[in-house]
């Protein structure tokens, strides 16, 4: 493979699962860390269809704030290492729990978004979604330009199913992986956290990149502790000729 030494001890079927930790060094607050988003909010208060039905303004104020924070964020070296892997490894698959779009902004083209993307909005009436990068939003809550119904962020809330196509792609990748990278996730949210377990059950080698131990650490054959903006490029550099 161009630019990759043949010392690569694994075949081309490398799969990466990323969580909020990969965007932390880009300035995007994580969900459960010390400065986490949830610290100031309670997930069941905001990231659920019930919360949106009860108080769409409050939910949209949270998402409008996150859009403003993320609009200022730039991909970091960890995002860029994954772009290089996609180019170098034909069978590489990137699965993300993140909704910030930083993988695509870094240049990743094949991204399986398990939880949607907060740069897309969806008309609750027409069930039609489109990209909307307006920061700030002209009105809270934003409304559909054609039918006037409420728009919602095109993300997966707690209690909502993962989009079936994304889930099928993720499960197939986990089953076929021979190396599964678990990057910057607390391994708490399901069903995403079941993917490393599935990959291991199907014979994949697991490497975890995180600041601290998680419920997935016992699965890992190798653990890289430290900021992933530093550890992932260092791990990847070993395979460059
Ligand atoms: C479903 C989109 C079924 C929105 C998100 C009990 C009660 C109720 C529900 C459940 C329950 N048990 C399980 C459930 C199901 C529930 C769930 O998992 N709940 C959890 C809280 C227990 N799951 C669901 O509801 C899912 N749907 O099950 O549907 C169904 C089926 C059919 C039909 C109908 C229904 C949907 C889950 C998706 C929720 N949406 N996000 C939004 O973002 O606004 S989840 C949210 O959490 C984000 O996507 C986030 O990515 C995700 C996971 O968190 P992490 O990414 O891991 O982030 P976190 O902050 O937790 O951790 C960061 C990690 O990075 C840490 O480990 C930290 O150490 C590390 N780190 C930090 N900095 C760095 C770093 N590492 C390295 N370097 C650094 N610099």
Image (cartoon, rainbow, N blue to C red):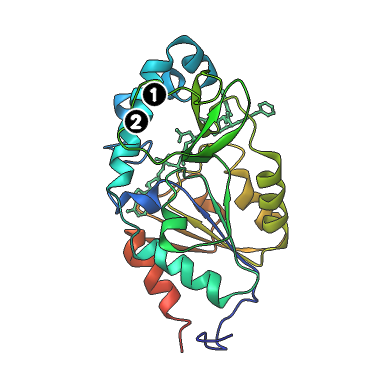
Local crowd at mark 1 within 10 Å, few (<14), some, or many (≥20)? many
Q: Which residue is mark 2?
A: 137
Where residue 128 appears, as percent x and y from the top left, is 61, 32
Q: Which residue is mark 1?
A: 60
- Left-right relation of 98 to 41: right
Residue 239 visible at all: yes
Residue furthest to the top? 54
Where residue 134 appears, as percent x and y from the top left, is 36, 38
Where residue 140 appears, as percent x and y from the top left, is 36, 21
- Left-right relation of 106 to 10: left
Split into 4 quadrants, where in the image is the N terminus?
bottom right
SS class of the residue under badge 1?
A: helix
Tell me the residue at 58%/22% (across/down): 124
Badge number at residue 212: none
Marks 2 and 1 close (CB-CB < 8 Å): yes
Task: Examine the rendered structure and indicate whether residue 11 appears above or below residue 70.
Answer: below
- Left-right relation of 178 to 120: right
């Amino acid at each position: 493979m161009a630019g990759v030494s043949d010392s690569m001890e694994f075949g081309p079927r490398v799969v990466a699962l990323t969580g909020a930790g990969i965007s932390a060094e880009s300035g995007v607050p994580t969900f459960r860390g010390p400065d986490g988003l949830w610290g100031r909010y309670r997930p069941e208060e905001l990231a659920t269809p019930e919360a949106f039905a009860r108080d769409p303004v409050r939910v949209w104020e949270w998402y409008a704030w996150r859009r403003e924070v993320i609009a200022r964020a730039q991909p970091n070296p960890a995002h860029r290492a994954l772009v290089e892997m996609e180019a170098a490894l034909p069978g590489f698959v990137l699965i993300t729990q993140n909704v910030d779009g930083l993988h695509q902004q870094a240049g990743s083209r094949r991204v399986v978004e398990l939880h949607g993307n907060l740069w897309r909005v969806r008309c609750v009436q027409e069930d039609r979604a489109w990209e909307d990068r307006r920061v700030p939003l002209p009105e809270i809550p934003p409304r559909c330009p054609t039918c006037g119904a409420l728009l919602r962020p095109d993300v997966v809330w707690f209690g909502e199913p993962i989009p079936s196509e994304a889930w099928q792609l993720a499960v197939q990748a986990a089953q076929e992986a021979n190396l599964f990278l678990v990057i910057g996730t607390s391994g708490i949210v399901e069903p995403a956290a079941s993917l490393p377990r599935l990959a291991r059950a199907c014979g994949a080698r697991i490497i975890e990149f995180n600041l601290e131990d998680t419920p997935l650490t016992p699965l890992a054959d190798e653990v890289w502790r430290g900021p992933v903006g530093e550890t992932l490029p260092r791990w990847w550099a070993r395979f460059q000729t």
